[in-house]
Image (cartoon, rainbow, N blue to C red):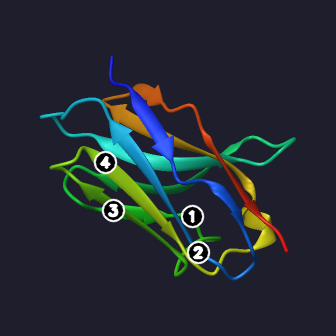
Amino acid sequence: QVQLVESGGGLVQPGGSLRLSCARSRSISTFNVMGWYRRVAGKGRELVATITSGGSTNYADSVKGRFTISMDNAKNTVYLQMNSLKPEDTAVYYCNLNVFGILSWGQGTQVTVSS
């Protein structure tokens, strides 16, 4: 079982930036996909961005051009750089690991965008 621990959430004003981090408990030698999802209160969890072990990335249309996902393999850490934040980005953000359909989730970190 791989453990995922998120950090970096908080309160930020509209237009501001935050960087989320997700530390993975160990390295993985096989193909895998790491991603960020978010859950808005009263709604389901939605995809934000993913990155494969090969470095390919994918983004939700709502965050394209504003968010950037990256992976530091030496640190077993995936990042989500969030710029130009909007109030509608307010949510609990979850880190996810997918290894051939076996999913692991972090505990989530709250991001609040408000003036």
Circle nearer the viewer, 1 or 2:
2
Residue count near mark 1 (Cα–Cα under 10 Å), binned few <14, some 14–19, many ≥20? few
- Placement of the C terminus among the 4 image quadrants: bottom right
Specify which label sits upstream in the sequence, 1 or 3: 1
Q: Is residue 75 above or below residue 98?
A: below
| Pointers 1 and 3 in contact (C-beta within 8 Å) | no
Q: Which residue is mark 1?
A: 60
Residue 69 coordinates in the image, percent (x, y)? 40, 63
State left or right for residue 33 relative to residue 74.
Answer: right
Circle nearer the viewer, 2 or 3:
2
Which amino acid does the dot numbered 3 rest on? Ser
What distance separates the C-alpha of mark 1 from that of mark 4? 21 Å
Determine whether the residue tagged by mark 2 lies in a helix, strand or loop.
loop
Q: Which residue is mark 2?
A: 17
Residue 106 coordinates in the image, percent (x, y)? 50, 33
Circle nearer the viewer, 4 or 3:
4
Specify which label sits upstream in the sequence, 4 or 3: 3
Determine whether the residue tagged by mark 4 lies in a helix, strand or loop.
strand
Residue lying at 43% horizontally and 27% vertically, measured from the top left: 103
Determine whether the residue tagged by mark 3 lies in a helix, strand or loop.
strand
Residue count near mark 4 (Cα–Cα under 10 Å), binned few <14, some 14–19, many ≥20? many
Q: Which residue is mark 3?
A: 70
What distance separates the C-alpha of mark 4 from that of mark 3? 9 Å
What distance separates the C-alpha of mark 2 from that of mark 4? 19 Å
Residue lying at 66% horizontally and 56% vertically, measured from the top left: 10
What distance separates the C-alpha of mark 2 from that of mark 3? 16 Å
Q: Is residue 38 above or below residue 27?
A: below
Q: Which residue is mark 4?
A: 77
Circle nearer the viewer, 1 or 4:
4
